[in-house]
Amino acid sequence: MSQNERVQEELEALEAILMDDISIIYNDQGCAELVKSTIFPSTANEVEKQYVCVTLEVQLPENYPDCKPLIKLKSPRGLDDSTVDHLYREIDKKCEEYIGQAVIYELIELIRENLTESNLPTCQCAVCLYGFSEGDCFTKTQCFHYFHNYCLAKHLIVTEKHYHEEQEKLPAWKRSTEGFQATCPVCREPISCDVHDLRSSLPPKELENAQKFELTHELKLLQENMQKLFSYQKSKGGIIDIEAEENKLLLITNSSDDPSDENSDDPGPSIPTNITEGSLENGLLKNQRCFNRFTNNR
Ligand SMILES: [Zn+2]
Ligand SMILES: [Zn+2]
């Protein structure tokens, strides 16, 4: 069998097995020059569980397979440099071993095995700031952000609780009728996941093995310095006292002058003319009564 026939046979077999997952580029003389395939980990066709991939490019020299082909790994996704370097070394060993034989399918299988083993995103979970270790249960959101299940569940439970607390503070007519919508902690895109399912996952390994938090001398110093800075900013009017701001608003919305109130049994609150701490408190109480009356009348 001529060399070209051997290559042709190998490529036909590849096309039969991989079908659309492989592309072969021919030169002007009709000889195969380049073979390309994007490889994903084996996840039993569960595409949403494929977190990494890489494109293999095999350049076929004239005397292939009696010499090693030239290999390039392109567009690695979710793989760090050391994983890609490791792949190159493994590929080189395999090519050496297969001189004189068809090697492309062997390479694809080798890469697929490696990807399946390292099918973990190399970024961090935005909730706990730890990475993803072997055995950690994690979720890829619809917006392509990664979180440990444990962390995402905790985040969603807290945000839902906060949402209901905020709703309860609102008068009935201002409350949302749509209910709580879970959103991605990174980009705030709406996400749909089963919190109870996520909740059953174990905490991330790195979090479990992390050193316990300790208030070190350095941290105490930092706290003291920040306290000084805070006091300085406050004295210069640079800190907004949210509570005081809210009280101001309550005083402004005082509607005791409203003529519709004149026939009411309740004398209603009056605008304090001289605001001292005591009168402010008094004014707030009256405002609250006024507000209650307002919402009850609706
Ligand atoms: Zn996490
Ligand atoms: Zn997102």
Image (cartoon, rainbow, N blue to C red):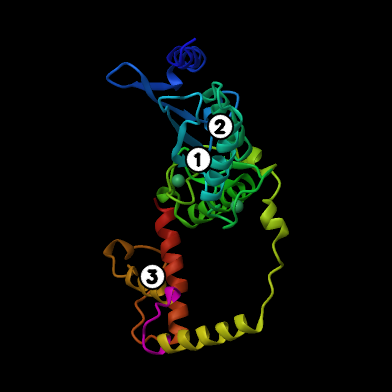
Give the residue at mark 1.
Answer: 141
Label 3 to label 1: alpha-carbon separation? 42 Å
Tag in front: 2 or 3 = 2
Estimate how packed mark 3 is, as few (under 14), some (14 to 19) or many (20 or more) residues with alpha carbons within 10 Å. Answer: some
For the residues labelled 1 and 2, say whether their Cβ atoms are less than 8 Å apart: no
Label 1 to label 2: alpha-carbon separation? 38 Å
Tag of residue 95 = 2
Q: Is residue 94 above or below residue 292?
A: above
| Secondary element at tag 2 | helix
Specify the segment rendered in magenta: 234-243
Tag of residue 250 = 3
Residue 47 visible at all: yes
Q: Which of 289 and 28 is in front in this view?
A: 28
265 drawn magenta: no
Q: Sequence-wise, which precedes: disc 1 or disc 2?
A: 2
Indicate yes or no: mark 2 CB to ligand 1 under 8 Å: no
Q: Is residue 87 above or below residue 252?
A: above
Estimate how packed mark 2 is, as few (under 14), some (14 to 19) or many (20 or more) residues with alpha carbons within 10 Å. Answer: many
Indicate yes or no: mark 3 CB to ligand 2 under 8 Å: no
Indicate yes or no: mark 1 CB to ligand 2 under 8 Å: yes
Disc 3 marks a residue whose amino acid type is Leu
Corner quadrant of residue 178: top left
Residue at image position (67%, 51%) is 204
| Secondary element at tag 3 | helix
Tag in front: 1 or 2 = 2
Residue at image position (43%, 73%) is 242
Residue at image position (56%, 87%) is 224
| Secondary element at tag 1 | loop
Q: Sequence-wise, which precedes: disc 2 or disc 3?
A: 2
